[in-house]
Image (cartoon, rainbow, N blue to C red):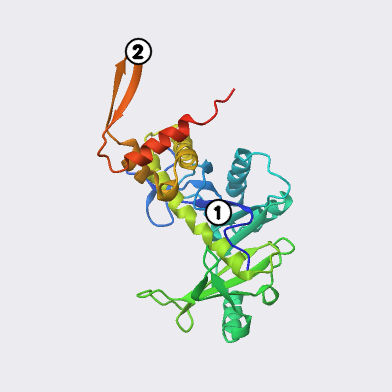
């Protein structure tokens, strides 16, 4: 079985809600009954738990969740942040059901970019689920991001059972079932203690478990968004929409700096730590600059628990070649 952590370069697109506690330009009611903004964001996922912010579009709170034009704009901006990629490197765009607009998927096909996008359970998909659920042989055991079999979880293909008219040629429908978590509230779509989800993709990989694991990894974008809010997105500061749009870009730049710092200077748990953790362990370390013979010296608290990590980071940064 192929390792799901290897494979194409994935771009995750997802929206979030930012609450506003005062009237600001373009604030509006949100679909969850709140009030504020509904930015759409794109992040790179390198497959190892790391990745940087690529693009973001600040939108009014009432912006549609699955607006194709907004997804196209954000993806084009994200693609512009990537360097020229070798011919053997594929790009896959992942999204939840908000990115399932057929116009957006058709655009990705024209751009020669693959997609893996969640879809809502329609009546036709529910019928397929009920039919396939009775046939054990059609379900493939699902795997974790490390390629280990996930206990009780399975994936099956239902492409031939659903009318996929309007989707790009070659679109496939995959279903996933997994046992309900302890305490989970059962819904009408759950059967025999299983919860079902569905996604469409145009990837031609025959290993359904790998396609499923790769799609599930889209969930990592939720952590990226939480990090963005911890880095300044939680409160847009101005009454002016243009200034808040710039603020959003600065937040994404700050996330990029954290990502590059982690990639170049950190390892272990810190290499994939949230910005809040890096700030607490490294950036807040107490220090004092002294000068002797015109040579400045940074003196650090020798009892700081993460002093070795900080010194290692300094050493690695100083060893980087200078750009001409």
Question: Would residue 13 appear left or right of 303 to someone viewing this image?
Answer: right
Residue 67 appears in the rendering? yes
Q: Are marks 2 and 1 in contact (CB under 8 Å)?
A: no
Determine the secondary structure under disc 2: loop
Q: Split into 4 quadrants, where in the image is the N terminus?
A: bottom right
Secondary structure state at the residue bearing disc 1: loop
Splitting the image into 4 quarters, where does residue 214 fall? bottom right
Residue depicted at 35% across the width and 44% down the height: 276
Q: Label 1 belongs to which residue?
A: 47
Looking at the image, which residue sits at the far top?
Answer: 293
Left or right, 120 with reference to 289:
right
Give the image location of residue 189, x and y in percent.
49, 77
Outermost residue on the front side: it is 293
Q: Position of residue 104 (x, y in %)?
A: 64, 53
Q: Is residue 258 above or below residue 91?
A: above
Where's residue 7, x and y in %?
Answer: 63, 56
Reply above or below: 274 against 254: below
Which is more toward the observer, 262 or 38?
262
- Spatial CA span between label 2 and label 1: 46 Å
User: For this rendering, which residue is in front, 239 or 276?
Assistant: 276
In the image, which is nearer the foreground, mark 2 or mark 1?
2
Question: Dot 2, crowdedness within 10 Å: few (<14), some or many (≥20)?
Answer: few
Residue 17 visible in the current orientation: no
Residue at left 37%, top 41%? 309
* 219 relative position to 237: left or right: right
Circle number at residue 260:
none
Give the position of the C terminus as an image quadrant: top right
Residue 201 on image: x %, y %: 65, 63
Q: 216 and 316: which one is in front?
A: 316
> Residue under circle 2?
294
Mark 2 vs 1, N-terminal side = 1
């Amino acid at each position: 079985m192929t390792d799901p952590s290897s494979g194409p370069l994935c771009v995750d697109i997802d929206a979030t809600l930012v609450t506003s506690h005062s009237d600001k330009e373009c604030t509006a009611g949100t679909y969850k009954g709140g009030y504020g903004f509904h930015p759409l964001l794109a992040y790179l996922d390198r497959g190892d738990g790391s990745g940087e912010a690529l693009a973001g579009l600040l939108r009014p709170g009432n912006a549609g969740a699955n607006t194709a034009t907004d997804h196209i704009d954000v993806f084009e901006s994200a693609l512009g942040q990537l360097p020229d990629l070798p011919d053997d490197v594929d790009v896959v765009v992942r999204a939840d059901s908000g990115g399932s607009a057929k116009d957006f998927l058709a655009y990705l096909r024209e751009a020669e970019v693959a997609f893996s996008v969640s879809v809502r359970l329609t009546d036709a998909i529910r019928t397929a689920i009920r039919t396939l659920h009775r046939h054990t042989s059609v379900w493939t055991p699902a795997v974790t991001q490390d390629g280990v079999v996930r206990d009780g979880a399975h994936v099956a293909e239902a492409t031939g059972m659903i009318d996929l008219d309007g989707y790009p040629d070659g679109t496939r429908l995959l279903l996933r079932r997994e046992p309900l978590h302890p305490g989970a509230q059962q819904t009408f779509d759950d059967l025999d203690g299983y919860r079902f989800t569905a996604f469409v993709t145009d990837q031609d990989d025959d290993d359904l478990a790998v396609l499923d694991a790769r799609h599930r990894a889209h969930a990592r974008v939720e952590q990226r968004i939480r990090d963005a809010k911890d880095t300044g997105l939680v409160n847009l500061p101005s009454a002016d929409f243009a200034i808040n749009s710039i603020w959003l870009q600065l937040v994404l730049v700050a996330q990029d700096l954290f990502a590059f710092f982690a990639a170049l200077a950190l390892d272990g748990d810190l290499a994939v730590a949230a910005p809040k953790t890096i700030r607490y362990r490294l950036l807040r370390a107490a220090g004092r600059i002294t000068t002797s013979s015109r040579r400045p010296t940074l003196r650090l608290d020798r009892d700081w628990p993460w002093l070795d990590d900080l010194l290692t980071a300094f050493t690695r940064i100083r060893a980087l070649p200078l750009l001409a």
